[in-house]
């Protein structure tokens, strides 16, 4: 009965909200599930989600919720790490519509922004005027200004430009009680408040001047609690600063005026090596007199490969600026000299590309630190404590000792110059004893931080993670002032309750509590997660790198999010829905869930997240797993039969290929596409008149090459659709002196297959059968170490990853996977002395997503360079992605993905430019959407070889 009443009340709430606002309102299970978590350890289920279009919509949401007594939680990018972006009432999503930069005044160096403006968008707009926004969290590509103001975010340049509070000039705020006001600096701004607030703020400050003057520790990264000391007259009576960092508990931000800074024209990055983390921490504050832009620290246990770094066990990344490159370099060299003999080595990096590569290691640390070196999980909660910079060395030693005392592990890194440390700790948050240890450690660490004169939070806010412990830092009297300040602004307690004051316990609402207590029965082996699907889904910690709107030049993740802009089509959104599917509270249909199915429908299975996600979420595998269970014993979509079983159809069609090619050019093709679930806009690829394997059988007696053996994989796409690629590869491999062989077909002359099309459509039983047949046939042929050269990147990736993970019980599968090589890798390893033909022309095109994610393209880059093919290939995704772009309903998203990088680069290429694409999907997309023809690298090299005698 209670559940029905709650459902009815939620429906009535959603209906009233929908009538009151112009933006989107949803109480649907899928949309609520997407907002249950942020990047913290916490989970709370909202009753509805609203995406307001303007401040009037926000005011209407507050009115409806106030009348109904429903809490409101403002939310930006959802990357908060302390739980403050989760709530049980109505979540106000500022990212969909409130993304406007209202104005930017280069002369005064200020900008007026809405709360949903992404930091990188503001930086790009300011950059056109030689300006930037100083605070720069590692999530700068997706965090919002509203979220930064809510948390008082900082970033690596805070030693130069301070925290967000230092950049806030004025805030336009809506209170839960319905007031709309401007909070600025000075007594005039205070006088402009409604009388209730004006008199209340003055009374609070005047009544406790001594406590406000003495109760706060002095350090650059004091983020915990309300900044009531900013209201002191000697500090300018700065109401805007006092509200910054209030975590949405006092008002909802409608608009903000922020200051911009002028960065130096040139930068040089000094990387200083130290014997260990402690030495780096001791040294960090001594570099501040050189006026650096950053002093970031990390140790070898986080960096992994130290390639390109000076020798040492820990490093400080110190950025120096100058008006010219020479001045920046001179300042960096001066700093290195001044660092003295405590360093083990140093280097100065001036090349922007190398600088970006080093900074990417630091920016991804919030994700990579979630896994310990042995693969076990690590979690936030105490990831941003700060102490006075001069105390950092002693604090870190005591911190390490406290970890050891509690039997815990963590990998500190972070803003050493500001005394702020980030660390994920291997808490066990799944069992009662582990949660007790988490709580006991938290109390002890809070006392340690306070003993060193520090702040429980130095960047991410208190939220639910630390607010309970604020009395240890500030004492009961100052915390009592916090409560009075909250009650003054929000007497009904409707804004983000449970945060900062009167908080929920730090061990309540843990996101893991509703997950299954035992491993779920699944098909893939999930070797990196102990075979546990729940653990695989837990990989997503919410840092939301998948929500970037513009990928880097070599990045892929997440093409469907960039095409739609919807959270459910991001890697994080899909992981959230899978989490809620396992939890069973919001998404209640388990594997039959339509919410999860719909979100996964636009997943291209590009595997970009497998490499680009800092925590290695592999949504392509999760999608295949879900589809297997979702359609078990049920009729599947037509495309699963037509394209999921493509190898069978192509084998049957091969004898009558000319006839079918002719029919594909008639009106009958439309009926065939409707029957097969294929998009009507798509042309059917032409079948080869002579499959590659048949050509090979004819020429086999004449084949040459006495050098090292290579087993060439006759994948389905090469065999039946692009045999010219196979013929070209044979030509090149033999020119390199290699002895090329092809595996014999399986029993009853059945062609061997990697199983890719069955995997991508979730037909995992059939995929496993196909893969076992392949392993049976290839095992004896690869026993002597012969590599398996695979021309189609998607098939190579399937053999390298999907096959051993589906056949995790068969050790032969792992051996087969280890033998897989790309075309370029084969040449590099087996014929290192071979010189490719010099082609000397520019090249454009795309690296296949699966190659990027699983195999890498370093060997391909080197081979192209040796052949004189100049220019880098596009990042992103071609959008066709195997069956995805052919399926009915996917055409528009498929084209949008291609238009992001690939198609513009092809269209803009000068005549004579080589268009490269090793993937059949990529070549097909280019052929169908441009007037250019793309070729496999093997084809290009073969065409450059001299004719055979």
Image (spheres, rainbow, N blue to C red):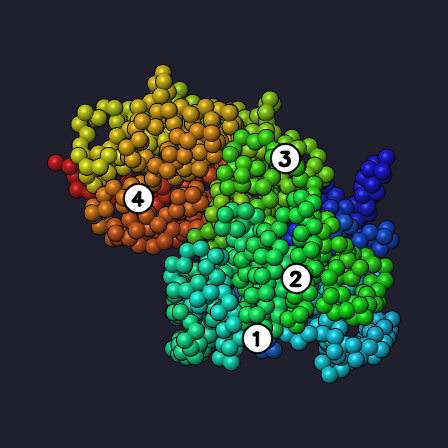
Q: Does any portion of residue 78 appear in the rendered image? A: no
- Whole-percent x, y for residue 693 in the image: 30, 26
- Whole-percent x, y for residue 711 in the image: 29, 32
Q: Residue at x 49, y 45 (%)?
A: 610
Q: CA distance from mark 1 to mark 2?
A: 19 Å
Q: In the rendered structure, are the residues bearing label 1 and label 2 in contact, judged by CB atoms less than 8 Å apart?
A: no
Q: CA distance from mark 4 to mark 1?
A: 52 Å
Depth check, mark 4 against mark 2: the one in front is 2
As drawn, the label of residue 412 is none
Q: In the rendered structure, are the residues bearing label 4 and label 1 in contact, judged by CB atoms less than 8 Å apart?
A: no
| Mark earlier in primary sequence (4, 3) | 3
Depth check, mark 1 against mark 2: the one in front is 2
Identify the residue position indicated by label 4 in the image: 824
- Whole-percent x, y for residue 880 in the image: 47, 39
For mark 4, give the secondary structure.
helix
| Mark earlier in primary sequence (3, 2) | 2
| Mark earlier in primary sequence (4, 1) | 1
Q: Could you tell me how many numbered marks the image carries?
A: 4
Q: Nearer the viewer, residue 810 or 47?
A: 810
Identify the residue position indicated by label 3 in the image: 518
Q: CA distance from mark 4 to mark 2?
A: 52 Å
Q: CA distance from mark 1 to mark 3?
A: 47 Å
| Mark earlier in primary sequence (1, 3) | 1
């Amino acid at each position: 009965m209670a559940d029905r009443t709650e459902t009815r009340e939620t429906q009535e709430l959603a209906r009233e909200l929908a009538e009151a606002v112009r933006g989107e309102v949803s109480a649907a299970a899928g949309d609520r599930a997407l907002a249950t978590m942020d990047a913290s350890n916490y989970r709370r289920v909202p009753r509805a989600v609203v995406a307001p279009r303007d401040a009037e919509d926000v005011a209407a949401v507050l009115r409806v919720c106030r009348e109904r007594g429903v809490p409101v939680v403002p939310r930006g990018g959802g990357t908060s790490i302390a739980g403050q972006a989760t709530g049980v009432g109505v979540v106000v999503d500022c990212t969909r519509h409130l993304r406007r930069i209202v104005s930017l005044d280069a002369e005064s160096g200020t900008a007026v922004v809405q709360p949903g403006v992404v930091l990188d968008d503001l930086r790009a707009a300011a950059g056109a005027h030689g300006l930037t926004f100083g605070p720069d969290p590692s999530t700068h590509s997706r965090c919002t200004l509203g979220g930064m103001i809510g948390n008082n975010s900082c970033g690596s340049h805070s030693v130069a430009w301070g925290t967000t509070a230092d950049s806030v000039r004025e805030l336009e705020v809506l209170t839960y009680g319905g007031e709309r006001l401007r909070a600025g600096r000075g007594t005039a701004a205070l006088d402009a408040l409604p009388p209730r607030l004006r008199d209340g703020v003055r009374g609070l400050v005047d009544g406790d001047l001594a406590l406000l003057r003495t109760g706060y520790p002095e350090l650059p990264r004091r983020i915990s609690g309300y900044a009531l000391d900013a209201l002191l007259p000697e500090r300018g009576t700065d109401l805007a600063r006092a509200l910054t960092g209030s975590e949405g508990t006092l008002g909802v931000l409608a608009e903000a005026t922020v200051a911009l800074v002028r960065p130096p024209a040139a930068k040089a990055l000094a990387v200083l090596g130290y014997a260990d983390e402690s030495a780096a921490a001791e040294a960090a504050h001594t570099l501040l007199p050189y006026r650096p832009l950053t002093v970031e620290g990390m140790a070898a246990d986080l960096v992994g490969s130290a390639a390109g770094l000076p020798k040492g066990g820990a490093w400080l990344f110190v950025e120096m600026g100058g008006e010219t490159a020479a001045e920046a370099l001179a300042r960096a060299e001066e700093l290195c000299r001044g660092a003295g003999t405590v360093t083990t080595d140093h280097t100065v990096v001036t090349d922007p590309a190398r600088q970006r590569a080093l900074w990417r290691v630091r920016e991804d640390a919030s994700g990579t630190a979630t896994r310990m070196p042995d693969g076990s999980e690590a979690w936030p909660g105490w990831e941003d404590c700060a102490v006075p910079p001069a105390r950092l060395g002693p604090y870190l030693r005591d911190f390490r000792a406290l970890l050891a005392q509690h039997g815990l592990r963590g990998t500190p890194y972070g803003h050493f110059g500001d005394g702020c440390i980030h660390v994920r700790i291997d808490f066990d948050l799944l069992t009662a004893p582990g949660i007790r240890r988490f709580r006991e450690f938290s109390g002890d660490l809070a006392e340690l931080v306070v003993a060193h004169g520090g702040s429980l939070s130095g960047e991410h806010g208190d939220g639910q993670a630390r607010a309970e412990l604020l009395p240890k830092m500030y004492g009961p009297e100052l915390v009592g002032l916090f409560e009075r300040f909250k009650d003054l602004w929000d007497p009904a307690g409707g804004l983000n309750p449970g945060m900062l004051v009167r908080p929920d316990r730090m061990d309540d609402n843990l996101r893991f509590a509703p997950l299954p207590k035992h491993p779920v029965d699944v098909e893939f082996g999930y070797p990196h997660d102990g075979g546990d699907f729940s653990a695989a889904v837990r990989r997503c910690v919410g840092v939301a790198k998948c929500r970037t709107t513009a990928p880097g030049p070599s990045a892929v993740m997440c093409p469907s999010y960039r095409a739609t802009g919807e959270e459910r089509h991001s890697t994080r959104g899909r992981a959230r829905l899978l989490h809620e599917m396992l939890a069973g509270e919001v998404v209640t249909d388990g594997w039959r869930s339509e919410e999860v199915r719909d979100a996964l429908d636009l997943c291209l299975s590009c595997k970009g997240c497998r490499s680009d996600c800092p925590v290695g979420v592999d949504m392509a595998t999760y999608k295949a797993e879900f589809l297997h269970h979702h359609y078990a014993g049920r009729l599947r979509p037509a495309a699963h039969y037509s394209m999921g079983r493509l190898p069978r159809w192509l084998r049957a069609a091969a004898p009558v290929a000319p006839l079918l090619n002719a029919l594909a050019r008639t009106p009958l093709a439309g009926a065939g596409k409707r029957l097969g679930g294929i998009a009507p806009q798509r042309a059917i690829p032409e079948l080869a008149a002579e499959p590659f394997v048949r050509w090979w059988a004819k020429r086999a007696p004449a084949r040459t090459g006495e050098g090292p053996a290579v087993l060439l994989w006759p994948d389905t796409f090469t065999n039946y659709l692009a045999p010219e690629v196979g013929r070209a590869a044979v030509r090149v491999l033999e020119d390199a002196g290699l002895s090329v062989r092809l595996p014999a077909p399986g029993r009853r002359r059945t062609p061997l297959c990697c199983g890719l099309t069955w995997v991508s459509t979730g037909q995992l039983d059939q995929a496993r059968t196909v893969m076992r047949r392949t392993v049976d046939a290839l095992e004896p042929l690869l026993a002597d170490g012969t590599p398996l050269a695979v021309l189609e990147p998607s098939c190579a990736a399937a053999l390298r990853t999907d096959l051993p993970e589906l056949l995790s019980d068969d050790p032969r599968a792992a051996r087969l996977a280890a033998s897989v090589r790309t075309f370029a890798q084969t040449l590099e390893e087996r014929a290192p002395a071979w010189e490719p033909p010099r082609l000397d022309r520019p090249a454009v095109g795309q690296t296949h997503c699966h190659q990027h994610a699983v195999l890498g393209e370093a060997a391909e880059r080197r081979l192209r360079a040796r052949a004189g093919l100049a220019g880098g290939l596009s990042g992103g995704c071609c959008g066709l992605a195997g069956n995805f772009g052919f399926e009915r309903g996917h055409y528009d998203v498929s084209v949008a993905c291609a238009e992001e990088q690939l198609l513009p680069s092809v269209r803009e290429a000068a005549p004579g430019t080589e268009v490269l694409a090793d993937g059949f999907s990529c070549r097909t997309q280019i052929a169908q959407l441009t007037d250019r023809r793309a070729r496999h690298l093997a084809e290009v090299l073969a065409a450059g070889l001299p004719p055979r005698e």
